Image (tube, helix red, strand yellow):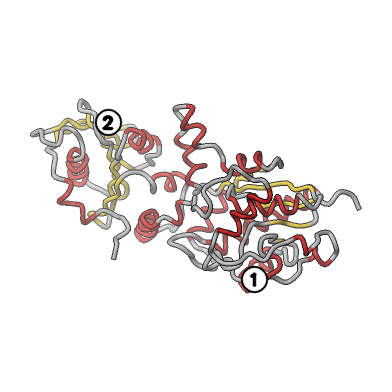
Amino acid sequence: MGKIKAVALMSGGLDSMLATKVIEKLGIEVYGINFYTGFCITEQRRRVDGAKSAASKKKLENAALKSAAEIEIPVEIVDISEEYLKMVTNPRHGYGSNVNPCIDCRIHMLREAHKYMQKIGAQFIVTGEVVGQRPMSQHKNTMRMIEKEAGVAGLVLRPLSAKLLEPTIPEKTGLVDREALYAIGGRGRNPQMKLARELGIAVFPNPGGGCCFLTDQTYAERFFDLMKHREQKTLTMEDVVRLRLGRHFRIKETHKIIIGRNEAENDLIEKYAGENMAIIKATVEKGPVGLIEGIFEDSDIVLAAAITAGYGKAKNMDSVEFEIITGSVRRVMDIKPVDPQIYSKFIIQHQVK
């Protein structure tokens, strides 16, 4: 047999770095793989928003690329965003935290990792999963079910929790020394921090942090609101971006209003406005940009513009001139600002109970 190879799922977090380093120390060649789903906070902002300064560019660097560079392994970035859009609207195994299809997500990623494993001639897959760390997808029975559905039963090695699990094929066949693996379990982080020091990993992201819009409570509320009011239960990448922007109001069942909170959001609201939506922006006074999405009439546009004006610097003026852009049609309206607090109960957001 030639050189032993493994494919490691690299999230950019500490656990996947540790798992990869443990296997690499056994003399095994490790090739990282990272998935772009469209919902990763940093990666979406890097691709969609862009960086306007050296500092922001550094902040928006791909976490998987940074962590792979730190432990000196190659990493392949695979775009699965199209498949993910279909999955997130109707996950077979339901949602975990908020709108995160964590089990379906794991199955899909392992299938893709298996394809890459076969492509490069690797023998098994490595993940940084820890038994009991995540409430839905990291229990022993669930892990076995995920492997089976992904078609990789016995091929997924979890070095951090291996001694708490049944031996995998690479362990049984002698490719990996089980005694060199660990028995870390639960949600605590101290064992991982200790192991990082032992392995000489000095630079790593904030441990245990989330990076996905789908686990955000307000994002989830907006997602479910959109699906409730959309006849065709489909999602586009433009929807994904708009869901994170601005303040969202659902005053009528037929449409919703989005109002930008800063210049960057204003630019993106204009850029990602879809067909049959109306962009609402002041012609003179600089202020927030509004968007009305759905089925609406002129009276709805007037109200949306009035609320938008209420968030701007011209909120105390008798009237503000607004440009209304619907497709290629542009028109101007004089709008009297209203106090947006009157309509705050219509904001789509997580409500603390």
Is residue 47 visible in the rendered image? The answer is no
Q: Quadrant of the C terminus?
A: bottom left
Drawn side of residue 105 relative to residue 212, left or right:
right
> Is 9 in front, or is 14?
14
CA gap, disc 2 to disc 1?
A: 55 Å
What's the residue at 10%, 35% (across, down)?
316
Of badges 2 and 1, nearer the viewer stands 1
**Residue lying farthest right?**
1
Drawn side of residue 27 relative to residue 132, left or right:
right
What's the residue at 67%, 47% (across, down)?
33
Numbered mark located on residue 123 in the image: none
Under tag 1, what secondary structure?
helix
What residue is disc 1 on? 145
Quarter of the image where one finds residue 349 = bottom left
Residue 237, percent across and down? Answer: 47, 46
> Is 88 in front, or is 69?
69
Tell me if residue 76 comes above or below residue 90 in the rendering: above
Drawn side of residue 257 relative to residue 209, left or right:
left
Residue 204, percent across and down? Answer: 58, 45
The kind of residue tagged 2 is: Arg
The kind of residue tagged 1 is: Met
Residue 209, percent across and down? Answer: 49, 52
What residue is disc 2 on? 330
Quarter of the image where one finds residue 65 = top right
